[in-house]
Image (cartoon, rainbow, N blue to C red):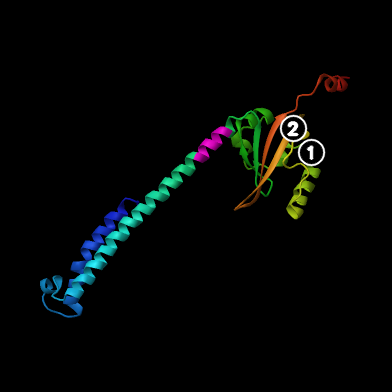
Amino acid sequence: MKQQNFARLGIIVGLLYWPAEALLHTLFFTGGRFIDNLIPSDANEAWMRSLIALAFIAFGLFAEREMRVQQAMRTRLTQKSRRLQAIIDHTYDAYVGIDPSGTITGWNHSAELLFGWPLQKILGQPVTTIIPERLREAHQRGMQRYSEESVGTILYQPTATFGLHRDGFEFPIDIVVTPLASDDGQEFFAFIRERIRNNREQHKEQP
């Protein structure tokens, strides 16, 4: 039911309550003519009917107001969420979101450029997809340790390691991983940038 209908429904029910009550009295309770039951001679009964009718109307108005407030809150949250996502999408660092099972749930444009994976193809893939095979066992041990002890050696601080490009080559990166508890469990958010090696490091790697 749309929110704008609550007030209308409350008013309709409130207005119909009086004749409905009179009809019930005519058919099942006191009998007599409908018009006599519609306008009761008993002041207390008339007062009670008026209060009940007003209660229906007030409830409808209140429900509509609450629905409007909730809708406004949802709209603001949606706008903030979109704004945050826009900020993440335009950051220089690559952003990777990971759920408790180690599945990639977040990915921005910089991550696409850095790892070579478009958003549509990487979402839902295990995070080990972008971790070199020689480092995956250490990653799994770290995840297991954090799950058991809530301790992680690479959390909250820049860490030098290596990433795996879609084309299969490794490259050096700096990564900062932050855990965040959510309704679905412990999630992780990583911001990554390619590490620029100095001339001495590049010279050592040359044959």
* Residue 169 vertical position relative to residue 80 in the rendered view, above or below: above
- Relative image position of residue 48 (x, y in whole percent): 23, 71
Task: Read off the residue under disc 1.
Answer: 133
In contact (CB < 8 Å): disc 1 and disc 2:
no
Identify the residue at horizontal 75%, vertical 50% (top origin): 146
- Relative image position of residue 4 (x, y in whole percent): 32, 50
Q: Quadrant of the N terminus?
A: bottom left
Tag count in the figure? 2
Magenta span main SS: helix
Crowd around label 1: few <14 · some 14–19 · many ≥20 (10 Å): few
Residue type at mark 1 is: Glu
* Secondary structure of the residue carrying numbered label 2: strand
Task: Read off the residue under disc 2.
Answer: 174
Crowd around label 2: few <14 · some 14–19 · many ≥20 (10 Å): some
* Secondary structure of the residue carrying numbered label 1: helix
Q: What is the residue that sits farthest to the bottom in this orientation?
A: 30
